[in-house]
Image (spheres, grey):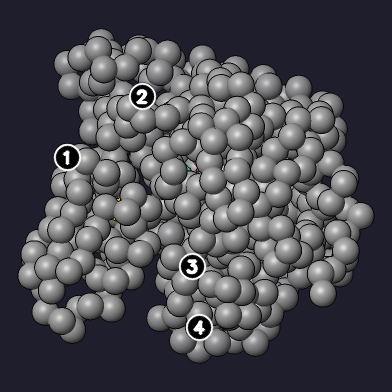
Amino acid sequence: MRVTVDRDRCVASGQCAVIAPAVFDQGEEDGLVVVLDHAPSPEQKPELEEAAFVCPARAIALE
Amino acid sequence: MKDPAPAQLAEPFPWPRYPFDPPELYAWLRRERPVTRVHLRNGQPVWLVTRYDDVRAILADPRASADLSKEGFPQFGFRPAGAHERPFLRMDPPEHTVFRRLLAKSFLAKRMQAMRPRIQQLADDTIDAMLAAPDRTADLVTSLALPVPSTVLSWILGVPAEDRDFFNEETQHLLNRENTGDPGAQERALRAGKSLRVYLTGLLEARESRAEAGEDILGMLVTASRDGSITRQDAVNTAMVLIVAGHDTTANMVAVGTLLLLHHPDQMAVLRAEPELMPQAVEEMLRFLTVVHLVVLRVATEDIEIGSMVIPAGEGIVPLNFSANRDDAHYPDADCFDVRRSCRDHVAFGYGVHQCLGQPLARVELEVVFGTLLRRLPELRLAVPFEDIPFKLFSQINGVSALPVTW
Ligand code: HEM
Ligand code: SF4
């Protein structure tokens, strides 16, 4: 799977980093999303889909 | 066959709700008229949006403005006390973005989770004080629900420990305004708003004269006003909006959440037996109760087509998160409270660019407080009949003004 994020849209809610901590983190200074793993394993699909759906800024795309 | 429109639809909005449930009309609207125009008490027309998908669509739509100075913004008659100036909650990007980015650092999810041991200690100390009551009864609102969030706010803002009693007392008065119809309380709330503004202005000034502004929120605000990204007035308004947004919300959630558990002994037993369910139970309580209900307001800046309707530019919108969270099309059996449900996608914290900034903190506070109550008070129960609980059925935030309990 491939994960891309749009940091310009991100509003630093932190939801993705809590739902899928292996893949997302927040920047220490600005709270914006940081992708830790751009090509996570397919087992992580459920969390990633949840994070993408929950994201209030619709900033997460999965392929 | 279509049901006839209930007579209540013609009555001014908001309609009365129930202790734990939204007005019945919301369910009818979701089914028959998901986007509908009604009138507020002052005669202003507003559009109610009731379905989960539509509520999220509106809250993610840049044409649905949160700017309260725009013509047509829903006017419920009560402004958040203390927020005389327009807080960033009521601004649009890019103006809003400045504040959101500035504060994001102070609300990092990891940072909030790292506060858990300190919040646990606070919950334990607060409950110790409550348990000292010789007659084994207490009002859970004043003895637990209010002091915990206001103390946590004082920490993150950077209020000095010696001022904490003053701060807790004033914030409680500030929030008392709509809990009672009592004009004395209203007047005291106004005074509390003024005294907190004066106090915060003084704290900010004192920080300005120091070389190191500090790492807490007041420090960040001083740094930002020094480098010119915000004004001193903005700094005071921002501190005030955090107090208003972070206190009453969490406090009501603690009080009504406890009452909800007491009302569902089976669910409370599940949580006592499986405390690891607490994080998801908190999400379910947030969804089910949606305490911050009539705060999420918008105005259309262009015509917005939604479903088969068009909300015209210049008219107010009330995206009903309480209705969205009870939408059976998204949550099967949505009116059933079930701590085993998984529902992190609820809209109790809103959605879109204004989604609650304090949510990671609120989650930690709620998990700790409910967890501690269940663990330490196995005999917790109401001290009065359920019917005698003073619910705030018309206020902007759902809650109770007192919760007499015994153990
Ligand atoms: C259970 C507790 C809470 C609930 C249910 C809640 C709910 C909400 C909701 C629904 C909004 C969105 C308003 C809108 O879209 O117009 C919001 C925004 C906000 N909340 Fe919370 N809140 C809670 C606790 C807190 C706490 C503890 C803080 C801070 C200490 C906080 C700070 C804020 C701020 C600053 C905003 C405005 C964000 C923005 O406009 O970008 N909230 N909250
Ligand atoms: S969930 Fe969305 S808005 Fe929140 S931090 Fe992640 S990317 Fe940003």
Name the residue type under label 2. Glu
Q: Is mark 4 within 8 Å of ligand 1?
A: no
Report the mark closest to the observer, 1 or 2. 2
Up-down relation of residue B224 to residue B127 (above or below): above
What is the chain identity of the residue bearing mark 1?
A
Front in this rendered view, residue B86 or A42: A42
The reply to whether discs 3 and 1 touch (Cβ–Cβ < 8 Å) is: no
Q: Is mark 1 within 8 Å of ligand 2?
A: no
Q: CA distance from mark 1 to mark 4?
A: 36 Å
Name the residue type under label 1. Glu
Determine crowd level at label 4: few under 14, some 14-19, many 20+ residues with C-alpha closer than 10 A: some
Which of the two labelled residues, at mark 3 and mark 2, occupies the earlier sequence position?
2
Up-down relation of residue B309 to residue B96 (above or below): below
Q: Quadrant of residue B189?
A: top right
Name the residue type under label 4. Arg
Residue at position x 73%, y 44% from top?
B37
Q: CA distance from mark 1 to mark 2?
A: 19 Å
Residue A32 x %, y %: 21, 46
Residue A31 visible in this rendered orientation of the protein: no
Q: How many marks?
A: 4
Name the residue type under label 3. Glu
Residue bearing mark 2? B95
Residue bearing mark 3? B283
Say what secondary structure mark 3 lies in: helix
Say what secondary structure mark 1 lies in: loop
Say what secondary structure mark 4 lies in: loop
Determine crowd level at label 3: few under 14, some 14-19, many 20+ residues with C-alpha closer than 10 A: many
